[in-house]
Image (cartoon, rainbow, N blue to C red):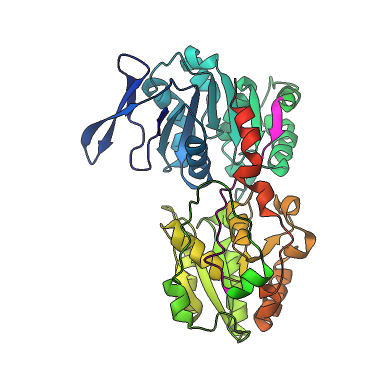
Amino acid sequence: MLGHVHIPPTRHLDRARLDGSLEQVKWWRRSEGTIRWLTCLAAAPPSVLLLEAFYGGSHKQLTDLLSSQLDSCSVFTLPAKKWHWRARTSALYFSQNIPPCPSYRVLFCSSVLNLCELAALRPDLAGLKKVLYFHENQLVYPVRKDQDRDFQYGYNQILSCLVADVVVFNSAFNMNSFLSAIPSFLKKIPDHRPKDVAQLIRPKCQVLHFPLHLADVSGLLPKYKLLHSPAHPSDTDDIIRPQTARSSLQSSLGSQEDSPVRPLHIVWPHRWEHDKNPELFFSTMLKLKDEGLHFLLSVLGETFSDVPETFTQSRPLLEPHIVNWGFLSSKDQYVNVLCEADVVVSTAAHEFFGVAMLEAVHCGCYPLCPKALVYPEIFPAEYLYATPQQLHRKLRALCRRPQAARSHVVKVDTRSFSWDVLKGRFQTLLTP
Protein backbone atom coordinates (compact mmCIF):
# COMPACT_ATOMS: atom_id res chain seq x y z
CA MET A 1 0.00 0.00 0.00
CA LEU A 2 1.41 3.37 -0.94
CA GLY A 3 2.49 5.57 1.92
CA HIS A 4 2.57 2.64 4.27
CA VAL A 5 5.53 0.73 5.63
CA HIS A 6 4.05 -2.48 7.02
CA ILE A 7 5.99 -5.26 8.67
CA PRO A 8 4.02 -8.51 8.14
CA PRO A 9 3.96 -11.18 10.88
CA THR A 10 7.16 -12.83 9.64
CA ARG A 11 8.89 -9.52 9.06
CA HIS A 12 8.92 -7.94 12.47
CA LEU A 13 11.09 -4.91 12.86
CA ASP A 14 14.82 -5.34 13.29
CA ARG A 15 15.89 -2.00 11.88
CA ALA A 16 14.36 0.74 9.76
CA ARG A 17 16.08 3.61 7.97
CA LEU A 18 15.22 6.49 5.71
CA ASP A 19 17.46 6.62 2.68
CA GLY A 20 17.68 10.01 0.98
CA SER A 21 14.14 11.36 0.79
CA LEU A 22 10.94 10.56 2.63
CA GLU A 23 9.56 9.05 -0.55
CA GLN A 24 11.85 6.04 -0.32
CA VAL A 25 11.83 3.93 2.82
CA LYS A 26 14.10 0.95 3.33
CA TRP A 27 14.10 -1.58 6.07
CA TRP A 28 15.76 -4.89 6.64
CA ARG A 29 14.81 -7.95 8.58
CA ARG A 30 16.36 -11.09 9.90
CA SER A 31 14.94 -14.32 8.48
CA GLU A 32 16.59 -17.48 9.75
CA GLY A 33 19.83 -15.58 10.16
CA THR A 34 19.64 -13.82 6.80
CA ILE A 35 19.31 -10.04 6.56
CA ARG A 36 17.13 -8.92 3.67
CA TRP A 37 16.58 -5.42 2.38
CA LEU A 38 13.07 -4.37 1.43
CA THR A 39 12.04 -1.14 -0.25
CA CYS A 40 8.75 0.69 -0.28
CA LEU A 41 8.11 3.72 -2.49
CA ALA A 42 5.76 6.05 -0.69
CA ALA A 43 3.50 8.47 -2.57
CA ALA A 44 3.37 10.81 0.43
CA PRO A 45 5.37 11.12 3.65
CA PRO A 46 3.75 9.20 6.51
CA SER A 47 1.98 11.32 9.12
CA VAL A 48 0.95 8.54 11.53
CA LEU A 49 3.36 6.22 13.32
CA LEU A 50 1.71 2.97 14.48
CA LEU A 51 3.67 0.97 17.06
CA GLU A 52 2.73 -2.45 18.42
CA ALA A 53 5.08 -4.12 20.87
CA PHE A 54 2.99 -7.32 21.00
CA TYR A 55 1.83 -8.11 17.49
CA GLY A 56 -0.69 -10.87 18.11
CA GLY A 57 -4.36 -11.45 18.85
CA SER A 58 -6.52 -8.34 19.05
CA HIS A 59 -3.36 -6.17 19.04
CA LYS A 60 -2.50 -7.54 15.61
CA GLN A 61 -6.08 -7.23 14.36
CA LEU A 62 -6.27 -3.55 15.27
CA THR A 63 -2.83 -2.76 13.86
CA ASP A 64 -3.62 -4.51 10.58
CA LEU A 65 -7.02 -2.86 10.29
CA LEU A 66 -5.74 0.65 10.92
CA SER A 67 -2.78 0.24 8.61
CA SER A 68 -4.96 -1.11 5.80
CA GLN A 69 -7.69 1.52 6.11
CA LEU A 70 -5.71 4.68 6.87
CA ASP A 71 -3.52 6.52 4.40
CA SER A 72 0.01 7.69 5.03
CA CYS A 73 1.10 5.65 8.03
CA SER A 74 4.17 3.68 9.04
CA VAL A 75 3.89 0.51 11.09
CA PHE A 76 6.53 -1.06 13.32
CA THR A 77 5.85 -4.21 15.33
CA LEU A 78 7.51 -6.82 17.48
CA PRO A 79 6.43 -10.49 17.61
CA ALA A 80 3.79 -11.61 20.11
CA LYS A 81 6.21 -13.56 22.27
CA LYS A 82 7.39 -13.18 25.86
CA TRP A 83 4.87 -10.49 26.77
CA HIS A 84 6.66 -9.54 29.98
CA TRP A 85 9.87 -8.77 28.14
CA ARG A 86 8.03 -6.75 25.49
CA ALA A 87 6.53 -4.61 28.24
CA ARG A 88 9.92 -4.15 29.88
CA THR A 89 12.19 -3.54 26.91
CA SER A 90 10.31 -2.63 23.71
CA ALA A 91 10.62 1.14 24.28
CA LEU A 92 14.41 1.04 24.17
CA TYR A 93 14.40 -1.24 21.14
CA PHE A 94 11.96 0.95 19.21
CA SER A 95 13.92 4.07 20.17
CA GLN A 96 17.02 2.63 18.50
CA ASN A 97 15.32 1.22 15.42
CA ILE A 98 12.63 3.68 14.33
CA PRO A 99 14.25 6.15 11.94
CA PRO A 100 13.67 9.89 12.44
CA CYS A 101 10.91 11.17 10.17
CA PRO A 102 9.91 14.87 10.25
CA SER A 103 6.52 14.17 8.64
CA TYR A 104 5.15 12.26 11.65
CA ARG A 105 2.37 14.08 13.47
CA VAL A 106 0.63 11.31 15.46
CA LEU A 107 1.97 8.32 17.40
CA PHE A 108 -0.47 5.48 18.14
CA CYS A 109 0.52 2.55 20.37
CA SER A 110 -0.99 -0.01 22.70
CA SER A 111 -0.41 0.05 26.44
CA VAL A 112 2.11 -2.81 26.26
CA LEU A 113 4.68 -0.22 25.21
CA ASN A 114 6.13 2.00 27.94
CA LEU A 115 5.33 5.28 26.20
CA CYS A 116 6.99 7.29 28.94
CA GLU A 117 10.35 5.64 28.28
CA LEU A 118 10.02 6.01 24.52
CA ALA A 119 9.20 9.72 24.79
CA ALA A 120 12.20 10.28 27.02
CA LEU A 121 14.54 8.33 24.75
CA ARG A 122 13.26 9.94 21.56
CA PRO A 123 12.51 13.67 21.99
CA ASP A 124 11.49 13.88 18.32
CA LEU A 125 8.59 11.50 19.05
CA ALA A 126 7.71 13.13 22.36
CA GLY A 127 6.31 16.18 20.55
CA LEU A 128 3.82 14.18 18.50
CA LYS A 129 0.16 13.74 19.39
CA LYS A 130 0.50 10.57 21.46
CA VAL A 131 -2.49 8.21 21.50
CA LEU A 132 -2.38 5.28 23.94
CA TYR A 133 -4.83 2.41 23.36
CA PHE A 134 -5.73 -0.03 26.15
CA HIS A 135 -6.70 -3.52 25.05
CA GLU A 136 -6.31 -4.56 28.69
CA ASN A 137 -4.98 -3.02 31.87
CA GLN A 138 -2.55 -4.52 34.34
CA LEU A 139 -4.09 -2.98 37.46
CA VAL A 140 -6.96 -5.47 37.51
CA TYR A 141 -5.50 -8.24 35.34
CA PRO A 142 -6.25 -11.49 37.21
CA VAL A 143 -3.43 -13.16 39.12
CA ARG A 144 -3.59 -16.19 41.43
CA LYS A 145 -2.58 -14.05 44.44
CA ASP A 146 -2.33 -10.28 44.64
CA GLN A 147 1.24 -10.55 45.91
CA ASP A 148 2.06 -12.24 42.61
CA ARG A 149 1.14 -9.06 40.71
CA ASP A 150 4.25 -7.39 39.32
CA PHE A 151 3.97 -3.75 40.33
CA GLN A 152 6.10 -2.56 37.44
CA TYR A 153 3.65 -3.41 34.65
CA GLY A 154 0.76 -1.45 36.10
CA TYR A 155 3.08 1.39 37.08
CA ASN A 156 4.39 1.57 33.50
CA GLN A 157 0.84 1.93 32.21
CA ILE A 158 0.15 4.76 34.65
CA LEU A 159 3.29 6.58 33.53
CA SER A 160 2.34 6.06 29.89
CA CYS A 161 -1.05 7.66 30.56
CA LEU A 162 0.61 10.68 32.15
CA VAL A 163 2.71 11.41 29.04
CA ALA A 164 -0.01 10.51 26.50
CA ASP A 165 -2.23 13.19 25.01
CA VAL A 166 -5.21 10.87 24.55
CA VAL A 167 -5.89 7.64 26.45
CA VAL A 168 -8.35 5.30 24.76
CA PHE A 169 -10.00 2.19 26.21
CA ASN A 170 -11.84 -0.51 24.31
CA SER A 171 -14.67 -0.57 26.86
CA ALA A 172 -16.11 1.43 29.73
CA PHE A 173 -15.32 -1.51 32.01
CA ASN A 174 -11.67 -1.30 31.03
CA MET A 175 -11.51 2.45 31.62
CA ASN A 176 -13.46 2.51 34.89
CA SER A 177 -11.64 -0.46 36.40
CA PHE A 178 -8.27 1.10 35.57
CA LEU A 179 -9.04 4.57 36.93
CA SER A 180 -10.72 3.29 40.08
CA ALA A 181 -7.80 0.95 40.84
CA ILE A 182 -5.09 3.61 40.64
CA PRO A 183 -5.38 4.95 44.25
CA SER A 184 -5.20 1.52 45.91
CA PHE A 185 -2.51 0.38 43.48
CA LEU A 186 -0.25 3.31 44.33
CA LYS A 187 -0.74 2.69 48.04
CA LYS A 188 1.60 -0.26 47.60
CA ILE A 189 4.44 2.26 47.38
CA PRO A 190 5.96 2.20 50.90
CA ASP A 191 6.33 5.98 51.28
CA HIS A 192 6.41 9.28 49.37
CA ARG A 193 3.39 8.25 47.32
CA PRO A 194 2.22 10.42 44.40
CA LYS A 195 -1.17 12.07 44.81
CA ASP A 196 -4.20 12.71 42.58
CA VAL A 197 -2.82 10.64 39.73
CA ALA A 198 -6.21 9.33 38.58
CA GLN A 199 -7.51 12.92 38.44
CA LEU A 200 -4.64 13.85 36.14
CA ILE A 201 -5.36 10.97 33.78
CA ARG A 202 -9.17 10.98 33.72
CA PRO A 203 -9.65 14.09 31.50
CA LYS A 204 -7.57 12.43 28.76
CA CYS A 205 -9.66 9.26 28.74
CA GLN A 206 -12.33 8.10 26.32
CA VAL A 207 -13.97 4.84 25.31
CA LEU A 208 -13.66 3.70 21.70
CA HIS A 209 -14.70 0.12 21.15
CA PHE A 210 -12.44 -2.26 19.30
CA PRO A 211 -13.48 -2.07 15.62
CA LEU A 212 -14.60 -5.37 14.17
CA HIS A 213 -14.05 -5.95 10.47
CA LEU A 214 -17.32 -7.73 9.73
CA ALA A 215 -17.62 -9.39 6.36
CA ASP A 216 -20.71 -10.78 4.70
CA VAL A 217 -20.95 -14.37 5.95
CA SER A 218 -24.36 -15.11 4.44
CA GLY A 219 -22.74 -17.47 1.92
CA LEU A 220 -21.36 -19.56 4.80
CA LEU A 221 -24.38 -19.77 7.10
CA PRO A 222 -26.64 -22.84 7.31
CA LYS A 223 -30.21 -22.21 6.17
CA TYR A 224 -31.64 -22.00 9.68
CA LYS A 225 -29.22 -19.21 10.57
CA LEU A 226 -30.17 -17.28 7.44
CA LEU A 227 -33.81 -17.54 8.50
CA HIS A 228 -33.34 -16.58 12.13
CA SER A 229 -30.07 -14.69 12.56
CA PRO A 230 -29.37 -11.97 9.99
CA ALA A 231 -25.70 -11.06 9.82
CA HIS A 232 -24.91 -7.49 8.83
CA PRO A 233 -22.30 -7.28 6.06
CA SER A 234 -19.57 -4.71 6.08
CA ASP A 235 -19.10 -2.20 3.28
CA THR A 236 -15.34 -2.59 3.52
CA ASP A 237 -13.42 -5.20 1.57
CA ASP A 238 -14.19 -8.69 2.83
CA ILE A 239 -11.51 -10.34 4.88
CA ILE A 240 -13.56 -13.51 4.56
CA ARG A 241 -14.10 -14.86 1.07
CA PRO A 242 -17.64 -16.30 0.85
CA GLN A 243 -17.55 -19.92 -0.24
CA THR A 244 -20.33 -21.98 -1.75
CA ALA A 245 -18.75 -25.26 -0.76
CA ARG A 246 -19.17 -26.43 2.82
CA SER A 247 -16.12 -27.05 4.97
CA SER A 248 -14.82 -30.45 5.98
CA LEU A 249 -16.67 -30.08 9.27
CA GLN A 250 -20.04 -29.79 7.59
CA SER A 251 -19.21 -32.77 5.39
CA SER A 252 -18.53 -34.80 8.51
CA LEU A 253 -21.94 -33.83 9.87
CA GLY A 254 -23.73 -34.99 6.75
CA SER A 255 -26.69 -33.25 5.20
CA GLN A 256 -28.71 -32.74 8.38
CA GLU A 257 -27.75 -29.10 8.96
CA ASP A 258 -31.39 -28.10 9.41
CA SER A 259 -32.43 -31.17 11.37
CA PRO A 260 -33.57 -30.59 14.96
CA VAL A 261 -31.93 -33.88 15.99
CA ARG A 262 -28.42 -32.77 15.05
CA PRO A 263 -26.49 -32.36 18.32
CA LEU A 264 -25.85 -28.89 19.67
CA HIS A 265 -22.49 -27.57 18.44
CA ILE A 266 -20.64 -25.67 21.20
CA VAL A 267 -17.60 -23.55 20.39
CA TRP A 268 -14.97 -22.11 22.78
CA PRO A 269 -12.77 -19.71 20.70
CA HIS A 270 -10.36 -18.21 23.23
CA ARG A 271 -6.66 -18.09 24.07
CA TRP A 272 -5.46 -21.25 25.80
CA GLU A 273 -4.44 -19.50 28.99
CA HIS A 274 -5.51 -19.57 32.62
CA ASP A 275 -7.20 -16.16 32.55
CA LYS A 276 -9.81 -17.57 30.14
CA ASN A 277 -10.70 -20.16 32.82
CA PRO A 278 -10.69 -23.25 30.59
CA GLU A 279 -11.00 -25.38 33.74
CA LEU A 280 -14.60 -24.20 34.19
CA PHE A 281 -15.42 -24.83 30.56
CA PHE A 282 -14.08 -28.39 30.49
CA SER A 283 -15.59 -29.32 33.84
CA THR A 284 -18.96 -28.20 32.47
CA MET A 285 -18.48 -30.18 29.26
CA LEU A 286 -17.60 -33.30 31.25
CA LYS A 287 -20.76 -32.91 33.34
CA LEU A 288 -22.83 -32.76 30.16
CA LYS A 289 -21.06 -35.88 28.90
CA ASP A 290 -21.62 -37.75 32.19
CA GLU A 291 -25.32 -36.90 31.93
CA GLY A 292 -25.44 -38.64 28.57
CA LEU A 293 -26.22 -35.50 26.59
CA HIS A 294 -25.35 -35.26 22.91
CA PHE A 295 -23.26 -32.31 21.75
CA LEU A 296 -20.46 -31.41 19.35
CA LEU A 297 -17.44 -29.46 20.52
CA SER A 298 -14.98 -27.07 18.85
CA VAL A 299 -12.11 -25.74 20.97
CA LEU A 300 -10.31 -23.03 19.03
CA GLY A 301 -8.00 -20.16 19.96
CA GLU A 302 -4.31 -19.33 20.03
CA THR A 303 -1.83 -21.33 22.08
CA PHE A 304 1.35 -20.11 23.72
CA SER A 305 4.27 -21.78 25.45
CA ASP A 306 2.47 -22.37 28.77
CA VAL A 307 -0.71 -24.32 27.95
CA PRO A 308 -2.88 -25.19 30.98
CA GLU A 309 -2.91 -28.92 31.74
CA THR A 310 -6.69 -29.09 31.55
CA PHE A 311 -6.49 -29.11 27.73
CA THR A 312 -4.40 -32.28 27.54
CA GLN A 313 -6.36 -33.87 30.38
CA SER A 314 -9.79 -33.13 28.91
CA ARG A 315 -9.24 -33.94 25.24
CA PRO A 316 -9.23 -37.77 25.50
CA LEU A 317 -12.28 -37.66 27.79
CA LEU A 318 -14.24 -35.55 25.30
CA GLU A 319 -12.83 -37.08 22.10
CA PRO A 320 -16.17 -38.54 20.86
CA HIS A 321 -17.66 -35.02 20.87
CA ILE A 322 -14.75 -33.10 19.33
CA VAL A 323 -14.96 -31.89 15.73
CA ASN A 324 -12.33 -29.14 15.93
CA TRP A 325 -9.39 -28.85 18.32
CA GLY A 326 -6.74 -26.14 18.27
CA PHE A 327 -5.86 -22.93 16.51
CA LEU A 328 -7.06 -22.44 12.92
CA SER A 329 -4.53 -20.33 11.05
CA SER A 330 -6.92 -19.70 8.17
CA LYS A 331 -9.49 -16.99 8.82
CA ASP A 332 -11.82 -18.69 6.35
CA GLN A 333 -11.65 -21.96 8.28
CA TYR A 334 -12.17 -20.17 11.58
CA VAL A 335 -15.25 -18.35 10.35
CA ASN A 336 -16.62 -21.55 8.79
CA VAL A 337 -16.57 -23.20 12.21
CA LEU A 338 -18.28 -20.21 13.84
CA CYS A 339 -20.97 -20.24 11.15
CA GLU A 340 -21.62 -23.94 11.74
CA ALA A 341 -21.65 -23.73 15.55
CA ASP A 342 -24.79 -23.07 17.58
CA VAL A 343 -23.54 -21.75 20.93
CA VAL A 344 -20.41 -19.78 21.83
CA VAL A 345 -19.24 -19.87 25.46
CA SER A 346 -16.98 -17.62 27.47
CA THR A 347 -15.72 -18.69 30.87
CA ALA A 348 -13.23 -15.84 31.15
CA ALA A 349 -11.87 -14.59 34.44
CA HIS A 350 -10.47 -11.66 32.48
CA GLU A 351 -12.04 -9.87 29.55
CA PHE A 352 -11.95 -6.20 28.67
CA PHE A 353 -13.81 -6.47 25.35
CA GLY A 354 -14.26 -9.94 23.84
CA VAL A 355 -13.61 -9.90 20.10
CA ALA A 356 -14.10 -13.66 19.71
CA MET A 357 -17.56 -13.59 21.29
CA LEU A 358 -18.79 -10.80 19.03
CA GLU A 359 -17.33 -12.46 15.94
CA ALA A 360 -19.20 -15.64 16.85
CA VAL A 361 -22.45 -13.72 17.38
CA HIS A 362 -21.99 -12.12 13.97
CA CYS A 363 -21.81 -15.67 12.62
CA GLY A 364 -25.12 -16.56 14.27
CA CYS A 365 -24.02 -18.18 17.53
CA TYR A 366 -26.04 -17.95 20.74
CA PRO A 367 -23.73 -16.42 23.40
CA LEU A 368 -23.27 -17.47 27.01
CA CYS A 369 -21.02 -15.17 29.07
CA PRO A 370 -20.20 -14.49 32.72
CA LYS A 371 -22.30 -11.85 34.43
CA ALA A 372 -19.15 -9.86 35.12
CA LEU A 373 -16.25 -8.01 33.51
CA VAL A 374 -17.16 -6.30 30.21
CA TYR A 375 -19.99 -8.65 29.26
CA PRO A 376 -22.94 -6.80 30.87
CA GLU A 377 -21.84 -3.74 28.89
CA ILE A 378 -22.35 -5.60 25.60
CA PHE A 379 -24.76 -8.50 26.15
CA PRO A 380 -28.33 -8.41 27.54
CA ALA A 381 -29.04 -10.28 30.78
CA GLU A 382 -30.53 -13.35 29.09
CA TYR A 383 -27.08 -14.30 27.75
CA LEU A 384 -25.30 -13.99 31.12
CA TYR A 385 -24.73 -16.54 33.86
CA ALA A 386 -23.74 -15.71 37.43
CA THR A 387 -22.47 -19.10 38.63
CA PRO A 388 -20.97 -22.29 37.16
CA GLN A 389 -24.24 -24.01 38.03
CA GLN A 390 -26.18 -21.55 35.89
CA LEU A 391 -23.84 -22.14 32.95
CA HIS A 392 -24.34 -25.88 33.33
CA ARG A 393 -28.13 -25.56 33.47
CA LYS A 394 -28.29 -23.27 30.43
CA LEU A 395 -26.10 -25.58 28.32
CA ARG A 396 -27.99 -28.67 29.50
CA ALA A 397 -31.27 -27.10 28.41
CA LEU A 398 -29.83 -26.17 25.00
CA CYS A 399 -28.38 -29.67 24.53
CA ARG A 400 -31.85 -31.08 25.08
CA ARG A 401 -33.45 -28.54 22.74
CA PRO A 402 -30.86 -27.42 20.14
CA GLN A 403 -33.54 -25.69 18.09
CA ALA A 404 -33.99 -23.17 20.93
CA ALA A 405 -30.54 -21.80 20.09
CA ARG A 406 -30.91 -22.22 16.33
CA SER A 407 -34.21 -20.38 16.10
CA HIS A 408 -33.16 -17.53 18.40
CA VAL A 409 -32.29 -14.07 17.07
CA VAL A 410 -29.48 -12.74 19.27
CA LYS A 411 -30.29 -9.29 20.65
CA VAL A 412 -26.83 -7.82 20.00
CA ASP A 413 -26.21 -5.47 17.09
CA THR A 414 -22.67 -6.39 16.13
CA ARG A 415 -22.66 -3.68 13.48
CA SER A 416 -22.41 -1.01 16.21
CA PHE A 417 -18.91 -2.42 16.88
CA SER A 418 -17.93 -2.52 13.20
CA TRP A 419 -15.24 -0.53 11.43
CA ASP A 420 -17.89 1.04 9.22
CA VAL A 421 -19.51 2.65 12.25
CA LEU A 422 -16.33 3.45 14.21
CA LYS A 423 -14.10 4.52 11.32
CA GLY A 424 -14.85 8.23 11.66
CA ARG A 425 -13.90 8.29 15.34
CA PHE A 426 -10.61 6.54 14.66
CA GLN A 427 -9.82 8.95 11.83
CA THR A 428 -10.48 11.88 14.17
CA LEU A 429 -8.33 10.25 16.83
CA LEU A 430 -5.41 9.96 14.39
CA THR A 431 -5.71 13.50 13.11
CA PRO A 432 -3.11 15.92 14.56
Residue 353 spot, x, y in % from top left: 64, 48
The magenta segment: 204-222
Q: Is residue 18 left or right of residue 342?
A: left
Expressed as whole percent of the image width and height from the top left, the position of residue 76 reads: 42, 31
In this rendering, the answer to whether 129 lies above or below 282 is above
Q: Name the residue rendered at 66%, 72% in the picture.
A: 227
User: Which quarter shows the N terminus?
Assistant: top left
- Farthest residue toward the right? 381
* Res 210 visible: no
Residue situated in front as seen by the camera: 190 or 156: 156
Asked whether 206 falls inside the magenta stretch, the response is yes
Residue 413 x %, y %: 70, 55
As rendered, which of 281 and 167 lies closer to the eye? Answer: 167
**Left or right relative to 330: residue 371:** right
Q: Quadrant of the C terminus?
A: top right
> In front: 208, or 188?
208
Figure quadrant of residue 194: top right
- Predominant SS of the magenta segment: loop
At horizontal 50% and vertical 51% (from top left) the residue drawn is 238
Residue at the left extreme of this rendering: 34
- The answer to which quarter of the image holds residue 148 is top right
